[in-house]
Image (cartoon, helix red, strand yellow):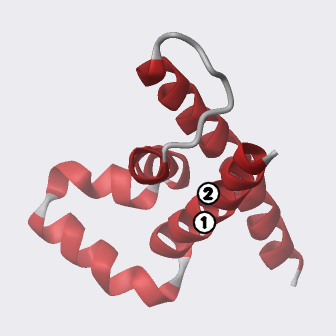
Amino acid sequence: MDQIITIISLSLITSIISFSVTKTDLFRGFRRWVMLNFSELADFIQCFYCLSFWIALVLVSIYQPKLIDSPIPVLDYFLSTFVIMSLSTFVGAGIIKALKEN
């Protein structure tokens, strides 16, 4: 049960960080700076889904949640990363939909 709560928490964290960086005015200057100085990252810094993957990967490497306990721990963490990324995408879609309705 603790792992599920951790996965859900990390999904919410991933979603709000990805949404904030890719969509909000707060990070507009940061996005411009990245695009000017690191043009190869321009698409990445504007893509909610792309950024979610990398944020989830970092969070999984730090917190190491495991939904599946197999003999291959790297696979467990990789799958946890995709679960977090998938859940964060649903949360992000909900945020975007809610903002469009207002």
Residue at the outermost right position: 101
Residue 42's quadrant in the figure?
A: bottom left
Residue at 57%, 59% in the rendered image: 14
> Which of the numbered marks, if any, corresponds to residue 27?
none
The residue type indicated by label 1 comes to Ile
Relative image position of residue 32 (x, y in whole percent): 27, 76
Tell me whether circle 2 and circle 1 mark residues in contact (CB < 8 Å). yes
Q: In screen coordinates, is 14 left or right of 83?
A: left
Quadrant of the rendering where the C terminus is positioned? bottom right
Residue at the outermost left position: 37
Q: Secondary structure at mark 1?
A: helix
Looking at this view, is 97 or 4 the one in front?
4
For marks 2 and 1, give the CA distance.
Answer: 5 Å
Residue at 58%, 13% in the rendered image: 70
Residue at 41%, 82% in the rendered image: 27
Looking at this view, is 16 or 58 the one in front?
58
In the depicted structure, whether residue 18 falls above or below residue 100: above
Relative image position of residue 50 (x, y in whole percent): 46, 45
Q: In screen coordinates, is 7 left or right of 53?
A: right
Residue at the outermost top position: 71
Residue at the outermost bottom position: 26
> Which of the numbered marks, if any, corresponds to residue 10?
2
Mark 2: few/some/many CA within 10 Å (<14, 14-19, 20+)? many
Q: Secondary structure at mark 2?
A: helix
Relative image position of residue 30 (x, y in whole percent): 30, 79
In the depicted structure, whether residue 32 falls above or below residue 29: above
Relative image position of residue 18 (x, y in whole percent): 52, 63
Q: Which residue is mark 1?
A: 13
